[in-house]
Image (cartoon, helix red, strand yellow):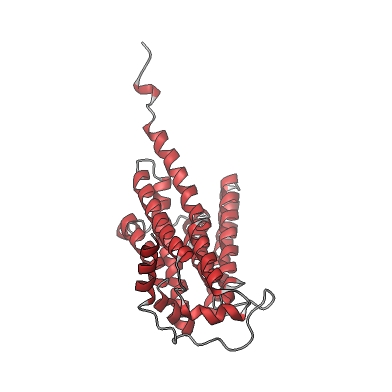
Amino acid sequence: MRRTFRLCGLLATGVAAPGWAALPEGPPPTLATAWTLTPWTLVPLLLLVVLYAAGCARRWPRRGVARADIAAAAAFACGVLTLVLALVWPLDAFAAYALSAHVAQHMTLLALVPPLLLAGRPGAVMAAAVTVGSGAHRRLPRWLDEAVTALAPATVAHVGTMLAWHLPAATSAALASEPVHGAMNASVLLAGLWFWSAVWRRLRARDGGAVGGLVALVTAMMMMGFLGALLTFAPRLLYPAYSDRALLIGVDPARDQQLAGLLMWVPSGVPYLAVGMVLAIALMRRLEPDPADHPRG
């Protein structure tokens, strides 16, 4: 096992270029200064909140406010707050210095923000905000709806994006370039939204699909667990670009890498496990015999 981790580590670091990412200028962040205030982040966040609030303001007076509407709005609000923690304060700033913060940011964007946002039913709510007239919104074209909820490619993109951006070369490139860093965060979030949209469709479908959803969730958990175990038990530092950066904030690079692995290995799997349990329960309920099919004699 130790040889396996060593081999994987050498293969991963073999494509890395330690000199790519120079140390950042200025003092390292503290909790009071760890803000990332850029229009590329703030404008989409503000637009997201405004559209959702406007949609609620139009839908609720017409339909009345049900408990399901309040629960959906609360889930969406939690998703937006979690997105702020990942992109505005404090994870994005600390991700430039600590691999553990980098992993926490990615796992938040990949596994936590998307299911929370999707639980808020943003499509229907935001459509109400921009629809003129009766408020009845058009459905997506069939081909686009099928593409958005295609589980197999969504799972490949989900896992592939996670693995690709955690190659040391890719991480170094993101640390050295703001455009690459922005593209990294955007692709991770989009991969998460695509995957969870496909899983969400299986969760709501009454005609099956739970098995496929379970396979996708288990696949993502297994790959995440493997990478987390690799980081936790690797006999050497796999990310040279973070060695000096971690020291700037008083963190030991080896322990930082172990913490990053543990974060990816254990808590990041909780959303997949929770949704997987819901799918398993739904599957077992569908397998139960219908009493109407076996009338008493």
Which residue lies at the image location 34% right of the left edge and 48% below the top edge? 212
Q: Where is residue 113 in the image (x, y as percent from the top left)?
A: 52, 61
Question: Would you place residue 64 above or below residue 101 in this image?
Answer: above
Q: Position of residue 40 (x, y in %)?
A: 52, 78
Is residue 275 something one can see in this rendering? yes
Query: Count the marks: how many?
Result: 0
Which residue lies at the image location 38% right of the left edge and 47% below the top edge? 214
Front one among 233 and 163: 233
> In this view, which residue lies farthest toward the left?
143
Q: Where is residue 2 in the image (x, y as percent from the top left)?
A: 40, 62
Which residue lies at the image location 67% right of the left edge and 78% below the top edge? 33
> In this view, which residue lies farthest toward the top?
297
Which residue lies at the image location 35% right of the left edge and 57% below the top edge? 145
Give residue 59's quadrant in the image.
bottom right
109 left or right of 7 in image: right
13 left or right of 128 in image: left
Question: Quarter holding the C terminus?
Answer: top left
Front one among 7 and 214: 7
Is residue 54 something one can see in this rendering? no
